[in-house]
Image (cartoon, grey):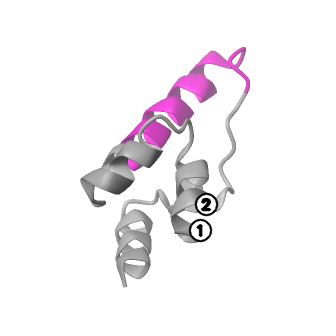
Amino acid sequence: MWKRQMELALGAKRKLRYVIGSVTKPPTSETEKFESWLACNSLVISWISQNVSDRIKKVIIYTETAQDIWEILKKR
């Protein structure tokens, strides 16, 4: 149920693609694209971390991408 709620929330904000992997991290040399990706990725990580228990948060908080966090959560 949690997964579905997150998918709906992320889809409503047009950010679901960050967790399913269809938006990939651009090279840092593409400054504008990279900064945009970084801001959106950070936002999605923030949303996810606010909706998990403190115990799970400790596991995922230093993970670099929302997609990697999503994969960790799927395994749990």
Image-quadrant location for residue 1: bottom left
Please tell me whether the stretch drawn in magenta is mainly helix, strand or loop: helix
Q: Amino acid at mark 1?
A: Lys
Tag 2 and tag 1, C-beta contact below 8 Å: yes
Q: Is residue 65 visible?
A: yes
Q: Which residue does the image show at 30% across and 60% down from the upper left? A: 52
Q: Residues within 10 Å of mark 1 (few under 14, many from 20)?
A: few
| Residue 40 vertical placement versus 27 (above, below) | below
Q: Secondary structure beneath disc 2?
A: helix
| Residue 58 vertical placement versus 39 (above, below) | below
Position of residue 25 measured from the top left corner of the image (x, y, whole percent) = 67, 36
Left or right: 26 as drawn, with respect to 8: right
Position of residue 7 measured from the top left corner of the image (x, y, whole percent) = 44, 72
Magenta stretch contains residue 3: no
Magenta stretch contains residue 31: yes
Q: Which residue does the image show at 36% across and 77% down from the upper left? A: 2
Q: Bounds of the magenta span?
A: 27-44
Q: Which residue does the image show at 51% across and 63% down from the upper left? A: 73
| Residue 7 vertical placement versus 46 (above, below) | below
- The total of numbered circles placed on residues is 2
Position of residue 38 measured from the top left corner of the image (x, y, whole percent) = 51, 31
Q: Secondary structure beneath disc 1?
A: helix
Q: Which residue does the image show at 72% across and 14% down from the upper left? A: 29
Q: What residue did someone put label 2 on? A: 71
Q: What residue did someone put label 1 on? A: 75
* Real-space CA distance between mark 2 and mark 1, rounded to the nearest whole angstrom: 6 Å
Mark 2 vs mark 1, foreground winner is: 1
Q: Amino acid at mark 2?
A: Glu
